Structure formats: structure tokens, C-alpha cells
Amino acid sequence: MVLHAAREPLRLEDVPVPEPQPGQVLLRVSACGVCRTDLHVLDGELPHPTLPLVPGHQIVGRAEDGRRLGVPWLGWTDGTCRYCLSGRENLCESARFTGYDLDGGYADWVVADERYCLPIPDSYDDVQAAPLLCAGLIGYRSLRLAGDPERLGLYGFGSSAHIVAQLARHEGRRVFGFVRPGDDAAARFALELGCEWAGPSDEPGPEELDAAIVFAPVGALVPVALRALARGGVVVCAGIHMSDIPTFPYELLWEERAVRSVANLTRRDGEELLALAPRVPVRTEVEEFPLEQANEALDRLRRGEIRGSAVLRVTV
């Protein structure tokens, strides 16, 4: 499925099987998760994709030697800049990203830098594993940057939040789910996954929060989340794109509250999450689509109609 221009549907095309270069591995794709970042690319909200482009960065596939590998968003870094050398490869200024700079997994075949591929735990099948590779990884990094909160609020209960809620409960945290006003199905889903309360995001929860993670790409939720924080709390903005944050009074930030963003991921994030997820165990709620229905999956994600994660089943 190929993107030729922003705000156009993907086209199903026959293209040559990519040829791996030195250091790359050729993978037969079995599943690829559908991510909100894919929507930001398709909708022109991320400005410089390499076109024509095969989207998709939550890829599970098999190498010729039988290894089952995952390909995440971070596809390559230079390894020599000040960020890479200080353990912050997620901030590399020369980084290349799967399904944005590099062709991704909405296809039968993909090539990837072998150094950035992740072994998939045996306890997950291909479709269940796919959401861990971005929704899970960004959620995991966001949870770590939230500090050590006793009371954690999750704003936007989609693919990432449904994984993070399970991780946070495993760590003994109290989790509160904030959903789109009127979305009773999402509130019930949050409660099923261990949230002790779930309600509309435009209203305060039952208690002050020590941290909040904003997964919804809605800038107006940042001051709402700040208003819900206890002293010293943090709001973590987990998305790669968000609408503008409105102005808010300084008193919402005072008393050592903080706002921070999460950018991309590191290979260490991937290794840690994929070791932790089977121990929890994290259960990914998945709705499958065939590859040729990628546009339908994206449209349903855009409308908020996916429970958990959408995944393209590419090959069996």
C-alpha cells in the first residue's frame, strides 16, 4: 500500500521486492500495526515524508534464516552525534524513521537495518506482537518519563493507553482513564484493563494525579491535565504531533508541576519492554484487517472506532 501524496488514499500496487544492502535484513512481513503516526503522515501533519512511501512502523516479519524480528519507528541513527554518544539516540538529528523516511510494513516485504530490529517474544503471535513495537514502546517510554507516580492519569484510551494501563497496574500504580466525552465504550474498556476510574477528559477525576500521560493529539488537554495534577506532578505528551496548546495561567504550572514531551524511542526501550511484556503479561487487544483494507483501518482509527489496536495481517 503506497502513499503518493498527503491527504490521498493509499494505493495497492505491485512493486519490486526490495534488495537488502550490507547491514540490512530482508523480512517477509506477517503483520504491521496501524498507528496514529501513520495518520499524521497521511494527513500531511508530519511535513517531509519520502514519497512515494510505504507506511507502517510496527512490523513483525521473518528473515530468510527463520528469525522473527520486529521493526520499530527508529530505523537508523548516525551513532556519532552528541545525542547518540550520550545514550539519546532517539534525539539523533540524522535519524531515519520507518514508514516515514524509509519504506515500512504495509507490504509483503521490507528491508531494515538489522541493528535496529528487535527479537519478538515467543509468547506473542505476530498480530498480538505488532502493537508493542510503537504503541507499547512509546507508552513504555512515556511511563518511565512520568517518574514514580502513585496516581497516574491516561488521557486518550487507544492503542498506547491500553498497553500502558497494564504495565502501570503491574507496577502497583493506581490508574485513572480519561476518555473522549460520551465514549462510554472506551470508559468500559479502561475499567476492564485495570483503571479504578474512567470518565470524560473534560472533567476532573476523583483524586489529584501525580502524573498524566496525554496520548490524544489534542493540545487543549495539556492545561486540563495540569489542572488535575497534584503539586510536583508531571504531564507527559506522548504524541509525535499535537494540535496547538492553548495559553494557560502560570498558576497551573506553579508548585513545581512540569510538562514534557516524548520523542521517538531507543533500542534499549525496545529491549526492556519486550522483556517485561511477557512477564506482566501484557494482553494486546487487536482488530485485524487484510493489507488491502489499510485505508479502511486508517479511517476507522481516525474516527476513534478501534478498540485497542488495529493491525494489518499481511501473510499467514
Image: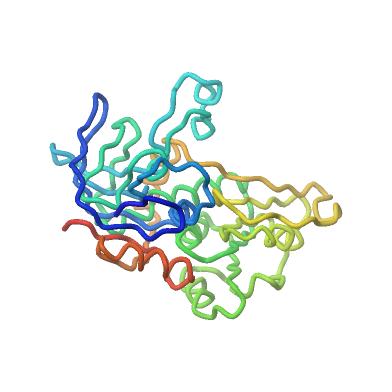
Q: Residue at x 18, y 40 (%)?
A: 63
> Where does the image place residue 25, in percent across and percent down from the top left?
23, 34
Residue sitting at x 25%, y 51%:
107
Q: Residue at x 32, y 62 (%)?
A: 294
Q: Position of residue 248 (x, y in %)?
A: 81, 57
Q: Is residue 135 visible?
A: no
Q: Is residue 8 left or right of residue 312?
A: right
> Where does residue 259 sit, x and y in percent of width and height?
70, 48
Q: Quadrant of residue 214?
A: bottom right
Above or below: residue 9 compared with residue 140? below
Front-most of residues 181 and 168 = 181
The image shows residue 79, relative to residue 136, as above or below, that is: above
In this rendering, would 94 be left or right of 61? Answer: right
Which quadrant holds the C terminus?
bottom left
Closer to us: 214 or 272: 214
Residue that protrudes farthest toward the left in the picture = 65
The total of numbered circles placed on residues is 0
The image shows residue 269 at horizontal and vertical percentages of 45, 40
Q: Quadrant of residue 209?
A: bottom right
27 sits left or right of 86 in the view = left
Image quadrant assignment for residue 111: top left
